[in-house]
Amino acid sequence: MTNEEFQTLLIAMLESGEGVSDCLFVVGKPPLIERYGNLHELPMDAASAVLQPGHTQAIADLLMKGSERLISDLDESGSCDTSYAIEGTARFRVNIYRQNGRVGLVMRKLQSNIPTVADLGLPEIFNRIAREKFGIVFVTGSTGSGKTTTLAALLNEVNQTQPVHIVTLEDPIEFLHPHKMAAFSQRELGKDFSDFATGLRAALRQAPKVILIGEIRDRATMEIALTASETGHLVFSTLHTINAGQSIHRILGLFSNDEEKQIRERLADTLRYIVSQRLVTRIGGGRLLVTEIMGSSLRTRETLLYGESENRSFQEIIEAGSTLGWHSFDQSLMTAFEEDLISEETALLFSTHKNKMRRDLEMAKKLRSPVSEEPSGLRIASF
């Protein structure tokens, strides 16, 4: 397959419908398109539309371009990450992986425009998050929940309001930020640095005020990220966790039991926010972003230091912090239901405490009337 033929195929996949987020190439299936979270086969008349091992291997070879690093990663770990662009049309984040001895590929379509907090309809608290001067901010969620998009909006806000140097460490670079009030140095894994820990050590010598770490994957990177946040830097990063409590457990799990007390103390001093995200089905089509946000307070720091207990949980602290702009997933879901953005079934399916959510949904339905109510202070974003 030539590059021109592959680009023609990709363009057909992108134009197959609205809401295309991913293009998938798996042996035994035609090319697949994910639209609004659901997979669809690319309509093709040819009997040879089903992909064979030779097809996916040819696409992988085309995308790896003979890179020794990518070939080594694929051979040694079973997957590798790269990027691909069709000039003037789209950019992609690419994951090439082995499955059952064959090659598969997933290409995530990247947005070309830098999002803003306002564009995404994110709550006002995100503007306050962008104004933090030091500490660490985690944006968490499953793969494809919009973490990178949210971080891009936060960095865009910093870029428009603060004269600082921003260093990003990414795998790969997804949003190309222009220089505005801030100066950007965007570095890509494998091209500009060998691993996140090495890149982060170097970043501390590059006079940044803000550092973005695409993902913290190991103890070494977490250790340096905490050090950076302790020495006057604002650090943004992601974790593949579903809520604040799980995020704390994941961080502690990177260290030994003997180190837990010290790490809890460091987190209590440096953690500014944990933003957790989920994408849910929206009434009328598309998906809706719901968030959980926990910030730093005396109660948060106490729980970080001594752990959760029967009378002290992150969930309870978050829901009691509504005056600070904090909210839980269940509160976000109830707001979306009350504004007729999601169905009762969706609210219940994605809720954390299902029995309480059932009671709250029943109460909300009883209180509904034809008279429109004042909108809540919690804004719901659409992705």
Image (cartoon, rainbow, N blue to C red):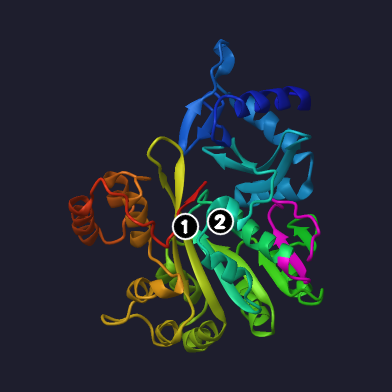
Q: Which of 172 and 210 is in front in this view?
A: 210
Residue 243: which quarter of the image? Answer: bottom left
How far across and down, in percent of the image, does residue 98 sit?
Answer: 58, 41
Q: Nearer the viewer, residue 48 or 121?
A: 121
Quote the CA–CA distance across marks 1 and 2. 7 Å
Q: Tag 1: Cα neighbours inside 10 Å, few (<14), some, or many (≥20)?
A: many
Name the chief secondary structure element in magenta: loop
Across and down, in percent, residue 102 comes to 57, 35
Q: Is the Cβ of the residue at disc 1 closer than 8 Å to that at disc 2?
A: yes
Q: Residue at x 52, y 78 (%)?
A: 255
Q: Is mark 1 on a helix, strand or loop?
A: strand
Per the image, the residue denoted by label 1 is 277
The residue tagged 2 is: 147
The residue that appears at 77% across and 34% down in the rendered structure is 88
Secondary element under disc 2, as helix, strand or loop, is: helix
Tag 1: amino acid = Gln
